[in-house]
Amino acid sequence: MTTAVDTPRLPFEQPDPLLLPPVLRRLREQGTVHKVRTATGDPAWLVTGYEQVKALAGDARLGRSHPDPDSAARLSDSAMFGGRPSGDFDTEPADHVQFRGLLTPFFTAKRMRALEPRVEALVEELLDDMERRPGSADLNAALAHPLPVLVICELLGVPYDDRDEFRAASEAAASTVDAEVSQRGMGELFTYMRELVALKRKQPADDVISGLCAIDGIDDDTVAGLAAALLFAGHVTTVTEIGYATVLLLSDPQQRRLLAEDPARVAGAVEECLRYRGSGSGGLFRYPREDIEVAGVRIGAGELVLLDLGAANHDPEVFDAPDRFDITRPGNAHLAFSHGGYYCIGAALARIELRAAIGALFRRFPGLRLAVPVESLEVRKEALDGGLVTVPVTW
């Protein structure tokens, strides 16, 4: 059903950085499919129900491309992943299968398990540096930013010394309010990767980019495009999640105590942190390739559909007391990594990094606490990945 309220506009105001925005909460309670307007003023359908979001996320009738991309509704002005149509409408389904087929061998469970000791060692090194500080730090700068960058650099074969260059390009590409800045950042990221691919062709190593270069029939532009997407997604989102997970646990003494009593609960804590947060920015964007019906609502081909993972992960039909943060929650089948054919290919890696970071952080800093009230934490509203600007902590 649709709601009868005035058409709300994304992104929704989020006074508490840890909770679903009040508007999204009301929409979730009033129905499953809602008419909204995006940050660009375009009309869209916001889907908030768990079962509907899950089904649509894996539905081959929806995709990221559009038959007329210049006239398509947009979620934002970001050129990277989540703002506007991408890909060739005529070939998108086949292209998507091909690209996943190319990347999946580099992200198998066996490969990720082999990487786990290295991730844990990097966390310990970063926390060693943090421990040498005079009792306070910005957790983003000390741990949340450098860890995913170090890991994705080693995995892809990107020089860590270039981090300032590609980090700046990534942040520009993630802009949701300036299309020109986003396009420029995306171009810079691709150009950087194009040069690195040329180097890997001459001097291959044991890394993902070299592995892609070794596959017959793949040109440099394709490898550079895949590598740029992996570099962006492989560090930006994990940076955000480490910060939020830390704040969630520091804000709930009972849940923190449960983790301290049994460090093995870190896996459950990570899953609950992934489930709990809702950004209110619209979630995954899709365009139906044909007319579809969702919860009794007809949605036309080419109309913008937003799959709100945060609202779905708070659906009371699926999660008992969904607005309660509970690291012992059983059967936590959240959709933070999407579902189906678009399920995040780096989900296993993200989980490894989050478990290593959160587990070691709270083990080594038992007196860790926020240095500012949680309500004063600032959300990055003009970036695709959201996230907290800083996470000041003391111990």
Image (tube, rainbow, N blue to C red):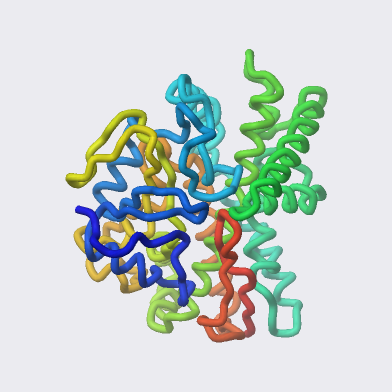
322 lies left or right of 353 = left
Q: Quick check: 229 above or below 176?
A: above
Q: Position of residue 26 (x, y in %)?
A: 29, 68
Q: Quadrant of residue 365?
A: bottom right
Q: Is residue 267 visible?
A: no
Position of the C terminus by quadrant: bottom right
Residue 243 rendering spot, x and y as whole percentages: 56, 67
**Drawn side of residue 115 relative to residue 187, left or right:** left
Residue at (61% x, 55% y) in the render: 177
Q: Is residue 228 above or below residue 268?
A: above
Residue at (35% x, 34% y) in the render: 288
Residue shown at the point (60%, 52%) measured from the top left: 117
Q: Quadrant of residue 373?
A: bottom right
The foreground one among 320 and 119 is 320
Instruction: Find residue 52 and report its horizontal and vertical position in percent.
Output: 26, 47
Picture residue at 52% right of the left edge, 71% below the top:
246
Query: In this rendering, does residue 374 appear at all?
Result: yes
Front-most of residues 94 and 301: 301
